[in-house]
Image (cartoon, grey):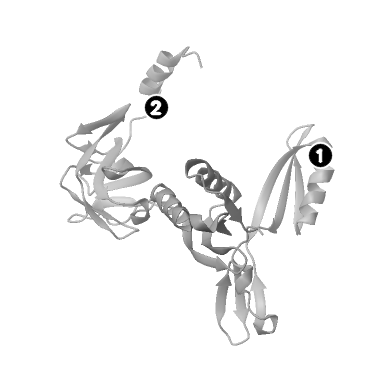
Amino acid sequence: KNGIGIEDVLQGIVEKLPPPEGDPTAPLKALVFDAIYDKFRGVILQCRIMEGTLKPRDTIHFMHAGRDFTVDEVGYNQMKLNPKPQLSAGEVGYVVAGVKSVQDIEIGDTITLLNRQAAEPIPGYQPARQVVFSSIYPMDTGDYQELTKALEKLAINDAALTFEKDSSAALGFGFRCGFLGLLHLDVIQERIQREFDIGLVISAPSVKYHLSLRDGSTIEVDNPSYWPDPTMIESASEPYIKASILTPESYVGPVMELCREHRSESQTMNYLSASRIEVTSVMPLG
């Protein structure tokens, strides 16, 4: 907070932490760990170069997304974008490659050169998966076009946000949106109301159910309005979570009761200290 000891910390990093590994002559492997949108330059990728070297005019290939782009600029983030002739193995920097939207790329993807591709991507990649779904309608039906523009602008910077057109007999036209969780939903709702001044009506969040029908087919339903006739359903499954809850000992009873109210199937307790307990519970996500 006061900057005390910062120089010692930085010097300790230089002296004690091992340098990054990687061969600058190997085929390029770069990890995309973040991206920001600039209205003049498009998406600016934040990357760590694991192997190889990346220069302007190189044609890059996203190994998971399967898209190709030509690099316009690379450099370091040093309070501002500082262009450099190249980025090499072990370095972290930015890449400008004419990417128009974050929907065109995926955070966690591996970048390689189109004409000299790496044998395999960097392990550990998992695409963003929406688990909570809700319908969003403008409070004033005349704001539908403005809501459309708002979602499109938010989606430019937020690849995890998905939306498609929806309608309701009572609320009119809106959008069915997918979110990473309830917090993600709250953030999007707050940004639409604050940044675009649009009043919203939001349906109760739901999860995606997998239904096996009597005719042998399988469907996924994330909107109660599209739930089929019960006589057509052979079986239904829903997503579950394993929740780890840290609580003071005095609240263990209410916490376990709350878990039971949410259809918890199993509960275990682990005493971390005399007054602190970890409650592990398996329960439906919805």
Q: Secondary structure at mark 1?
A: helix
Quadrant where the image shows the C terminus: bottom right
Q: Indicate left or right for 257 with 278 as reference.
A: right
Q: Residues within 10 Å of mark 1 (few under 14, many from 20)?
A: few
**Circle 2 Cα neighbour tier, 10 Å, few/some/many (<14 / 14–19 / ≥20):** few
Q: Is residue 125 above or below residue 49?
A: below
Q: Position of residue 56 (x, y in %)?
A: 17, 43
The residue that appears at 65% across and 84% down in the rendered structure is 232
> Which residue position is annotated with label 2?
17
Image quarter of residue 35: top left
Residue 6 relative to residue 180: left or right: left
Residue 252, position as x, y percentages in the image? 81, 42
Front residue of 121/167: it is 167
Give the left or right position of residue 30, taking residue 183 as reference: left
Give the residue number, with chain letter if any, for mark 1: 251
For badge 2, the amino acid type reads: Leu
Of the residues shown, which amino acid type is indicated by label 1?
Tyr
- Please report the residue visible at 30 percent of the width from the left and 29 percent of the height from the top: 80
Give x and y (percent) for residue 45: 32, 43
From the image, state whether disc 2 or disc 1 is nearer to you: 1
What residue is drawn where x is 65% and y is 73%? 236
Can residue 168 be seen in the rendering of this structure? yes
Does the residue at mark 2 contact the one at mark 1 (Cβ under 8 Å)? no
* Residue 70 position in % (x across, y down): 19, 51
Which numbered disc, 2 or 1, marks the residue that appears first in the sequence? 2
- Residue at 33 percent across and 30 percent down: it is 19
- Label 2: state its secondary structure: loop
What's the CA distance linking mark 2 and mark 1? 42 Å
User: Measured along the vertical axis of the image, is residue 222 above or below residue 178?
Assistant: below
Q: Is residue 117 left or right of residue 3?
A: left
Q: Which corner quadrant of the image does residue 265 belong to?
A: bottom right
